[in-house]
Amino acid sequence: MNSEKIVFTKPSAIDGMAVNQLVASCPPLDTNSVYCNLLQASHFSETSVAASLEGGEMLGFVSGYIIPNQIDTLFVWQVAVSEKARGQGLAKKMVSSLLERSSCSGVRYIETSITASNEGSWALFRRLADQLEAPLEESVMFDKQDHFKGKHDTEHLVRIGPFSNKLKSQ
């Protein structure tokens, strides 16, 4: 696959089903309805990115949005990378490509939520903090008992920033 070109695009509603199938193939990610993925790919296209083989299969997807009343903060909702594309830095490249867009020019913070056991996501966001030369802070966002009534692990809020939005040595 290294010889095949991966292209980064703004998703559209046409990508919703592919996003849904990709996320379903990436445990421990929480799956959403196809309708939710259609909204992610259309309403949030300016702050989301799809990574696909040129003219073909979707290999990765990042959904995000600018937090209302915090226009300097990009919340990364979900990061999914196909098993065949893992280990190549695709997730970091997708988030980096978002920060390069004009729609994210005012972003000085990245936030996301991660469960304690999701080692891949922790590693990704630590690498991003290093790349951005910015501090990473962690706190509880949604508690297992208080918010999920024991049916989902605690989601930890990860906040990176402030940063200058000038990416360092990708």
Image (cartoon, grey):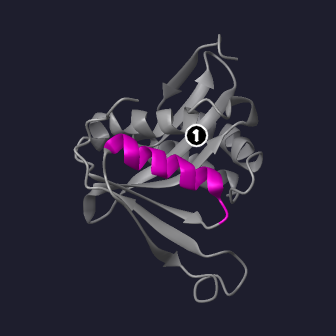
Image coords of residue 120 (percent x, y): 63, 50
Residue 128, magenta (yes or no): yes
**Among the 4 quarters of the image, the one containing residue 98:** top left
Residue type pointed to by label 1: Phe
User: Badge 1: how crowded within 10 Å, few (<14), some, or many (20+)?
Assistant: many
Magenta stretch secondary structure, dominant: helix
Tag 1, which secondary structure? strand
* Magenta residue span: 117-132
Is 151 drawn above or below residue 115 in the view shown? Answer: below
The quadrant the C terminus occupies is top left
Query: As displayed, is residue 86 above or below residue 47?
Result: above
In the image, residue 34 above or below residue 102: below
Q: Is residue 5 left or right of residue 73?
A: right
Residue displayed at 52% across by 70% down: 156
How many callouts does the rendering have? 1
Please provide percent x and percent y for residue 158: 45, 63
Residue identifier under label 1: 61
The quadrant in which residue 55 appears is: top right
Residue 11 visible to an observer of this rendering: no
Measuring 25% from the left and 36% from the top, which residue is drawn there?
A: 166
Query: Residue at image x 45%, y 74%?
Result: 139
Q: Is residue 114 visible?
A: yes
Residue 164 colored in magenta in the image:
no
Taking the image as shown, residue 69 lies to the left or right of residue 2, namely left
Front-most of 108 and 105?
108
